[in-house]
Image (spheres, rainbow, N blue to C red):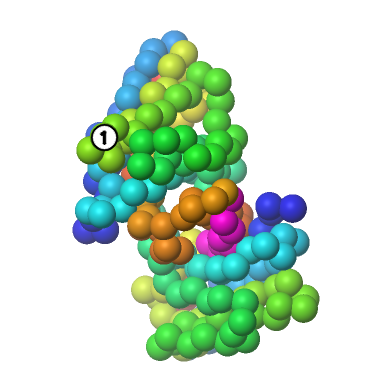
Amino acid sequence: QQQVKQSPQSLIVQKGGISIINCAYENTAFDYFPWYQQFPGKGPALLIAIRPDVSEKKEGRFTISFNKSAKQFSLHIMDSQPGDSATYFCAACVRISSGSARQLTFGSGTQLTVLP
Amino acid sequence: DSGVTQTPKHLITATGQRVTLRCSPRSGDLSVYWYQQSLDQGLQFLIQYYNGEERAKGNILERFSAQQFPDLHSELNLSSLELGDSALYFCASTRGTNGYTFGSGTRLTVV
């Protein structure tokens, strides 16, 4: 129930195209859904995040779409650029005990390649 | 610079040995999380500490242990190392809000 399923495993997009990565979850206790971007040899960096009371969040070329009833959320990268080539992880966060302890569960990652 | 410092950046050691990875969280962050990232396993949660106390355990092997010290830095101890322990080990910290900040990781190679 703690799993977050992510697809596709890899994605190749032409420059200027739209990249779409999908995630699904089961645990309805998840209450925060971030996306992380990771470049080779670097740690994951928070890209954008959404809470389940919002259906869409946009930051620049990056948009999260959230479907609470379907327990699915997706990342859209508009006007994809070669510099966007990285691994993207969706994640879901849940409170695991009293106080402020929270646990982040990651999807398996999507390797995005944007061709010039 | 994310504010989370991990040392060393690279570590090469032989099978059967023991190593210690160190993490200094971002200033003010009380929670520290350890993750293992290998090519075929993605980001696997190992263990979480909050203000010196263990809060949650993930897929952490019995050969691995961790602790968080009074100054909030954390150490991950890996013993009886096997070839399969070769991976990137990440530390992340948070103040208890939702945003995790990751360090740049320690690349462990067991030969």
**Given the image, on which type of amino acid does mark 1 rest?**
Pro
Main secondary-structure element of the magenta-colored stretch: strand
Coordinates of residue A91 in the picture (x, y in percent):
56, 61
The residue depicted at 27 percent of the width and 38 percent of the height is B73
> Compared to B70, does A23 lie above or below?
below
- In this view, B65 is above or below A3: above
Front-most of B69 and B87? Answer: B69
Q: Residue at x 46, y 55 (%)?
A: A100
Q: Which residues are magenta?
A: A89-96
Seen in the picture, residue B16 relative to A52 is either above or below; the reply is above
Residue at the spot 48% in from the left edge and 24% down from the top edge:
B64
| Front residue of B27 and A90 | B27
> Quadrant where the C terminus of chain B lies?
top left
The residue drawn where x is 31% and y is 53% is B29
Looking at the image, the residue that sits furthest to the top is: B16
- Residue B57 relative to residue B71: left or right: right
Residue A85 vs residue A33, the one in the foreground: A33
Q: In which quadrant of the rendered image does the N terminus of chain B lie?
A: bottom left
Left or right: B3 as drawn, with respect to A19:
left
Residue at the far front: name it. A98
In the image, residue A31 sits, relative to residue B69, either above or below, namely: below
A98 left or right of B97 in image: right
Residue B36 visible in the picture? no
Mark 1 = which residue?
A: B70
